Amino acid sequence: MSIELYNDGDHVCMMFNDLVDDNAAAVQANQFLIVSNGEGALIDPSGNMTFNGLIVGMGKFFHYKNLKYLLASHQDPDIVGSLNKWMMSTDADLYVSSLWSRFVPHFCTGDKTSGRIVGIPDGGMRIKLGKDEIVAVPAHFLHAEGNFQFYDPRSRILFSGDMGASLVHHDQVTQPIVTPAEFREHIEHMQGFHQRYMVSSKVCRYWVNMVKEMDIHAIVPQHGRWFQGKPAVHAFLDWIATLDCGIDQFDQSNYTLPR
């Protein structure tokens, strides 16, 4: 299913939410297409099981062979497991953290990645798309060591990778969370994931401080439902800023030999 997140006629943001979940062993994942004045970027294209469905789904809006960029928040298989197929079937360049730029070619065969992988520096960068730009926003250790989110200033959407993710069936991903009350009901689908996958409350707070200075209308994660409108966005930011997670919850008992 394709979900239109934004469309002003020249600039379109699409979300694809149901290309994985028929496989019960795989976590649900969202993929994102941004088309700006005829140029296209695909964010977190996911693994092999999504490839064919994504080509068909995005074909209604943009021909996959004309993609200019693949944008990867980090290096996990549910982010770029299908990289080999995209490298072979398009001329798109991959933008990924410079920490992972020499690791992701292991997903590929031959020399298809030669000269086509751009390492994003730790401070992030601005990537021109059509008459607009996509901003690679630092999100290190949320959860990967080198991690980026992608902000679209035109739509005011932050594509946030694993930050904000929830573990739900794709049928539950068709509608955004728009009120603080809805957010509170949604926490049970997020809490365990964030407590394990986000490295520490320290980096979560640093991230929140940065995001609160941005003009954001929606935070759209790679898994699960998204947060639309400032009330829902701020409900999420207030929650994650105070969550004990990752190494905050570990002590010596987590580092003992198994009996």
Image (cartoon, rainbow, N blue to C red):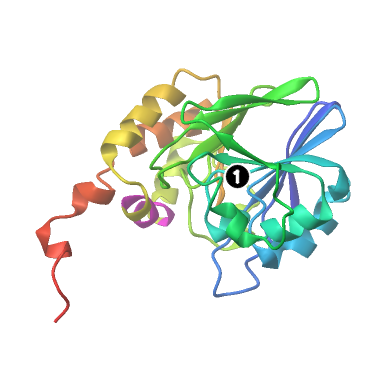
Residue on which disc 1 sits: 72
Point out the stretch of residues depicted in magenta: 189-195
Residue at 42% of width from left, 36% of height from top? 236
Badge 1 amino acid: Ala
Q: Nearer the viewer, residue 245 or 98?
A: 98
| Quadrant that contains the C terminus | bottom left
Secondary structure, mark 1, is loop
With respect to residue 187, does 201 lie above or below?
A: above
Q: Position of residue 166 (x, y in %)?
A: 48, 53
Is residue 108 something one can see in this rendering? yes
With respect to residue 55, does 203 lie above or below?
A: above
**Horizontal placement of 258 versus 95: left or right?**
left
Name which quarter of the figure residue 57 lies in.
Answer: bottom right
Q: Position of residue 171 (x, y in %)?
A: 63, 61
**Horizontal placement of 88 versus 157: left or right?**
right
Name which quarter of the figure residue 33 lies in.
Answer: top right
| Mark 1 closeness class: few <14, some 14–19, many ≥20 residues within 10 Å | many
With respect to residue 223, does 40 lie above or below?
A: above
166 drawn magenta = no
Magenta stretch, main secondary structure, is helix
Q: Position of residue 195 (x, y in %)?
A: 31, 51
Residue at 58% of width from left, 41% of height from top? 96
**Horizontal placement of 132 versus 121: left or right?**
right
